[in-house]
Image: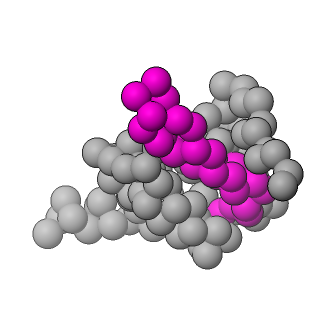
Amino acid sequence: MSQPQELPQLDKKELRVNSADNTKRVMYLIKEFLLNNDYVNLISGTGGAPISVRAAESLVRLGYVNYEIIKTDTVLNQKERRKTKLLVKLRKDPNFQALYDENEEIRKKTQEIMKLG
């Protein structure tokens, strides 16, 4: 049986997601982070994994990013409890800036309409 592969060493281009986070907020944070970076690592535990996956999948379907790495890791701590970790590395799509600008324009128009209404 082969040894499980370790998660890759990470740099500071990461966003930690926990169970209290909101999917839309995580999507917003990823897009804002990618304005100045080429990629982002989403890191979450068991509780935050569904939120990370929903946010990543939505951004992939919308064309903002592409999957680069999806890895899971399970560690036993001192009390013999399992601790799981999910890593999703997203790379910015070449069309990211055009999509971002288009969305920002729509968002501003919507805010203006809301102020008038």
Horizontal and vertical percent for residue 84? 51, 45
- Any part of residue 30 in sight: yes
Q: In the rendered view, would you say 59 is above or below 17?
A: below
Q: Is residue 83 magenta?
A: yes
- The residue lying furthest to the left in this view is 117
Residue at figure coordinates x 81%, y 60% from the top left: 94
Q: In the rendered view, would you say 36 is above or below 57?
A: above
Horizontal and vertical percent for residue 95? 75, 64
- Any part of residue 35 in sight: no
Residue at figure coordinates x 53%, y 35% from the top left: 76
Q: In the rendered view, would you say 8 is above or below 97?
A: above
Instruction: Check the image and tell me how it is coloured.
Output: one colour
In terms of depth relative to the viewer, which is nearer, 20 or 117? 20
User: How many marks on residues?
Assistant: 0
Which quarter of the rendered picture does the N terminus lie within?
A: bottom right
Provide the residue span drawn in magenta. 64-89
Horizontal and vertical percent for residue 14? 61, 35
- The residue lying furthest to the bottom in this view is 61
Which quarter of the rendered picture does the C terminus lie within?
A: bottom left
In terms of depth relative to the viewer, which is nearer, 69 or 96? 69
Please give left or right for residue 49 compared with residue 14 in the image: left
In terms of depth relative to the viewer, which is nearer, 32 or 52? 52
In terms of depth relative to the viewer, which is nearer, 58 or 110? 58
Residue at figure coordinates x 75%, y 54% from the top left: 69
Q: Is residue 82 magenta?
A: yes
Horizontal and vertical percent for residue 31? 57, 50
Residue at figure coordinates x 45%, y 34% from the top left: 80
- Secondary structure of the magenta portion, mostly? strand
